Amino acid sequence: MYKRILVPVDGSHTANAGLREAVKLAQEQDAQILVVHVVDDLVAVSPYLYGSLSQNVLNQLRANGQSVLTSAQAYVDKAGVAVDAWLVQTCGSRAGEQIIKTANEWAADLIVCGTHGRRGLQRVVMGSDAEYILRQSPVPVLLVRATESQPAAAERRERAAATGS
């Protein structure tokens, strides 16, 4: 049923949960996966960063993105699934917009992405690329909500204990 599965990755626990689910689907469906990482060049354009410093930040963002893609691609390849990886660059547009654009260009028939499951004010303030993708996608979207990792849970408990909440 699904033959071309697009998976946005950023190296986070949440994105990796989406990738793991996509690999399972791809194995069952004999599908291929495209892992995508979005780099926003606008991050490197700051009034505090000039010339070579700005270029260094941009180069580091691209290198980090490529590293995330390489890791994701190796994981998928090890699972015996056909995989390709794209580093997508933008200047000021949302990652979700670029994911939708890439899904159209690559002719994806499913997008699988991890979601933090933010609610309320946190979602309003932080925004949600997963929600954007879900609302705008021309193809089905599978959202995978990652369970909180042990280190993150311990850190949250320590913060709560320190503040008395």
Image (tube, rainbow, N blue to C red):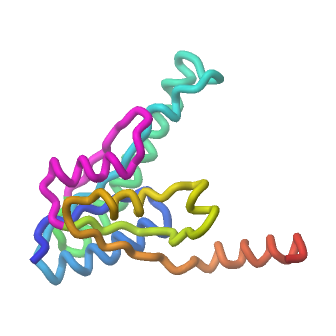
Is 105 included in the stretch rendered in magenta?
A: yes
Q: What is the x, y in percent for residue 79?
A: 24, 75
Q: In which quarter of the image is the C terminus?
A: bottom right
Q: Can residue 36 be seen in this view?
A: yes
Per the rendered image, the range of residues in magenta is 84-109
Q: What is the x, y in percent for residue 92?
A: 44, 35
Is 131 included in the stretch rendered in magenta?
A: no
Q: Is residue 66 left or right of residue 140?
A: right
Residue 84 lies, with reference to residue 147, above or below; the image says above
Who's the residue at 37% across and 46% down the image? 38
Q: Quarter of the image holding residue 143?
A: bottom left
Who's the residue at 72% across and 73% down the image? 156
Q: Is residue 105 left or right of residue 15?
A: left
- The total number of labels drawn is 0
Q: Quarter of the image holding residue 154?
A: bottom right
Residue 71 lies, with reference to residue 57, above or below; the image says below
Who's the residue at 47% across and 40% down the image? 61
Who's the residue at 34% across and 47% down the image? 97
Q: Quarter of the image holding residue 144?
A: bottom left
Q: Is residue 128 left or right of residue 81?
A: right
